[in-house]
Amino acid sequence: MFSFIKDLDKSRRTLLYACFYAFFCNGMIALTQGSMMPDMKAAYHLTDTAGGLMLSAHSIGNLAAGFLSGVVGVYIGRKRTVICLSALAFVGMLLITLIGAPGLLFFAFILTGVGRGSVSNFNNGTVNAITGGNAAASNLLHAVFAVGAITAPMAFLLLRNAIDWRAGVLLVVLCGAGSVLNLTRVTVPDDRPAPSAGKGRSGGFGFMRDPGFLVLAGMMLFYLCSEYAINGWLVSYIQHKDALLSGFGVTGEALEKAVRAYSQTMATLLWAVILVGRLTCAWLSRRVSPRKLMLIASACEAACFAAVLFSTTIPAVTLGVAGLGFFMAGICPMIYADAAPYTNAYPMATGILLSFGSAGGIAMPTVVGALADQYGFSGGMLAILAAIVLLVLCAAANLALGGRKKAIAN
């Protein structure tokens, strides 16, 4: 499964490991935002709608990064671009601990999105390029993201209880500083294409006329709709799920602590199982068509998320979260791997693919927060289920297209 690493020379292997660590930090950013949301809302007196807007601001930054990293990279090089833009994520996280004005918070969340999106754009494009679109490599990259996501909720909870919620956020800032420093030490192949490259086949937007790319873009949109909203709202949703309260067998302050610990544990469980699922997908993708795997995983993701929404006991919700994580696991990396013919041929393809996903990530967290204010969290989370159903339909279309997808010429 990991034989592709041995095939890389020392320079490319070092670059691969730098991408892995950067994605570990990206995972920490993603889950820390959801973990800190209840405390941040309480500290700064924010409504659920305002909290959703902050999560959407993160996605706006992510969307902007898809264009910025592709365009700026043509002129100053991808290495300099990812170093400069990725640093903004940790500047944003630092600002969140210092300011409470909604407008400034919104700006801080945009910065986190720009930084995280630039790393996603760089990492997915780079790993696809140096491994030839190897599905196992893409799954392993995203497995490292899961390790960061697993680490974040428990680290946040420990630091929150020992010091303050801001201490959990500052841990991410410190880890991110190491990531930025690490990226300054790597060598990136073909780092500075000429600005005129955009006029030839390797530039432009010819891939946007290919139905295969558009289906993959739809999958990315609906998948990241669900992932971003689940990451941002799972902890809050569980803390507001009244049907679970009697299952803890305690009341008062003890109940509050138990619910808080359980909700953070579920965020960790989700990404622990995602890690297992991504390693499993990396192994399976060598034996089973990734397109078939994506359809099966999407359908099972929908079933497990429905179980989380409609179950009323702690064991059932726990099993639902575990199943949700396992079946979510391989979808995003397999989309990137399946898109390799486009991303390897066109510098802008990775950014556009990420931008489609970010567009969904912008809308869904706010939609969930607004619906939660009106109808409660159960009503808000139904919007995520609708997005997953649309993901299943796109995965079916992707399977139907099969091998007909290709990067077309301008």
Image (cartoon, helix red, strand yellow):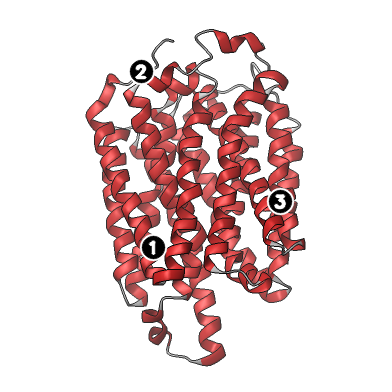
What residue is rendered at 55% in x and 39% in y? Answer: 63
Q: Which image quarter is the N terminus in? A: top left
Secondary structure beneath dot 1 equals helix
Q: Which numbered tag is attached to residue 381?
A: 1
**Residue 64, percent across and down?**
60, 37
Q: Is residue 85 left or right of residue 316?
A: right
Q: Are marks 2 and 3 in contact (CB under 8 Å)?
A: no
Q: Is residue 253 above or below residue 129?
A: below
- Among numbered discs 2 and 3, the one appearing first in the sequence: 3
Query: What is the count of numbered marks?
Result: 3
Q: Secondary structure at mark 2?
A: loop
- 145 w.r.t. 193: above or below: below
- In-front residue for pair 164/142: 164
Q: CA distance from mark 2 to mark 3?
A: 38 Å
In three-dimensional space, the C-alpha distance between marks 1 and 2, rounded to whole angstroms, equals 36 Å
Q: Which mark is residue 406?
A: 2
Q: Position of residue 321 (x, y in %)?
A: 38, 63
Asked if one can make out residue 384 in the rendered structure from this viewpoint, the answer is yes
- Picture residue at 39% right of the left edge, 87% below the top: 246
Task: State the residue at coordinates (61%, 45%).
Answer: 113
Amino acid type of the residue that numbered disc 3 sits on in the rendered structure: Gly
Residue, disc 3: 92
- Identified by mark 2, the residue type is Lys
User: Which is more N-terminal, label 1 or label 3?
Assistant: 3
Left-right relation of 317 to 19: left
- Residue, far left: 400
